[in-house]
Image (cartoon, helix red, strand yellow):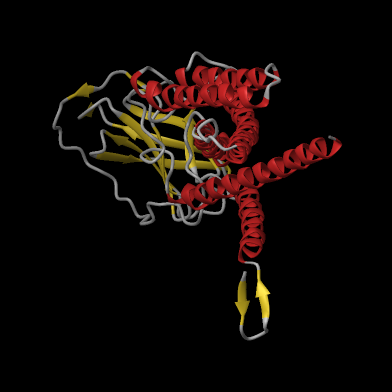
Amino acid sequence: MISNTGLGNPIDFKAFMKIWLKVICVALLAYVAVSTFWYPLIPAGLQVNINKINPGENQFTLTGYNTHFVSEKENLQVFVAIDSTARYCGSILNVIDNNHVLVSVNLPDTLSSANIAFVANDNTDGYIIVEQPIKSEGFVLIPGYKEKSCKISVIQTDHKGFGYPYQPIIMETIRNLMWHVPMWFTMFVLMTISFIQSIKSLNSGGRADDNLDKFLDQKKLLISDTKAAMSASTGLVFCLLGLITGSVWARFAWGAWWTNDPQLNGAMVVFIVYVAYFILRNSTPDLEKRARLSSIFNIFAFVLMVVLLMVMPRFTEGLHPGKSGNPAFSQYDLDSSLRVVFYPAVLGFILLGYWLYRINLSIRNIEISNDENEY
């Protein structure tokens, strides 16, 4: 208790912090829920509707995503880029809508490279590049050939405004990053609490000679065991939510609800192992024996979780970012626009997980107290 000398009323600091942590948790999750779905993906190029190009005139429709071709019609440029060294400007035949533009471009007989990209540019979207494989026929390829580049009049190279990064495979499902990944962060925090409580449980009881000390040691043993179980049960819920959101993401990004990915398989093994932890608890009626067996199994489960989810995936082939040569989120997907939502999401869900754990623990303590009162 802390005395407020100005008002003369004591302040319960712990209760005060509990209230504010709950307020922060709710505020963070509300911010994440709105921000996740409010902001669009940044403009990007999807495709062009031709399979090959030839010397002379080539017509194609360039398809964008979240682009502004109509509103930026006066500033819109479309050109063919050759190996990032030369540009051939196209003539815009028709701006069909904000995401489609019909273009004609004349190409010479001689090019310096067959590496071809289609680029749209305007002052709102910046540069939009389509790098799909295109066959080239009838060209004379001379490396180092000095080509004439058309003048680019649009200065704006980056998208104006806030938006999430566009990735060709995951596209709109990148928003699931704010939900799927924080579930696992929260699970790790809760399982770490459970792991620590299991260690404390094993270090309690059985060493005192006095009956009162034995009783107090056994009480500590059961309290730590209860905390370990309630934290693990809450963590298991977030593990299940992580599996569900991951499966949904896999369906849209990888084409299947489940793939042979080491991190996915490891997560399922972790879920099964922690389910076995609760089966073991329920099959042992003696409280002290249950506490000790459960603590040993819980420590094993935690170590296995770290190995399966953090160690092994980095040494095996996998689809998750940061695994076996795949670039990590910090280098590929997690740009500044995602960080301002992702980090609050992680903190918000961890606070939510801890809040639910405390509620779970309080309910369990009430049940234990009621059972003791019956006797």
Residue 166 screen position, x and y as percent? 48, 39
Foreground pick, 14 / 91: 14
Picture residue at 51% right of the left edge, 23% below the top = 296
Furthest toward the bottom, the residue is 6
Number of callouts: 0
Furthest toward the right, the residue is 374
Residue 50 screen position, x and y as percent? 45, 24
> Residue 71 falls in which quadrant of the image?
bottom right
Foreground pick, 340 / 307: 307
Residue 111 screen position, x and y as percent? 22, 29
> Residue 211 falls in which quadrant of the image?
top right
Picture residue at 56% right of the left edge, 25% below the top = 292
Up/down of 117 relative to 369, above or below: above
Quadrant placement of the N terminus: bottom right
Residue 63 seen in render? no
Residue 372 screen position, x and y as percent? 79, 37
Describe residue 326's horizontal placement relative to residue 239 as left or right.
Answer: left
Quadrant placement of the C terminus: top right
Foreground pick, 316 / 129: 316
Furthest toward the left, the residue is 144
Residue 107 seen in render? yes
Describe residue 237's horizontal placement relative to residue 209 as left or right.
Answer: right
Foreground pick, 277 / 204: 204
Up/down of 316 relative to 42, above or below: above
Up/down of 161 relative to 359, above or below: below
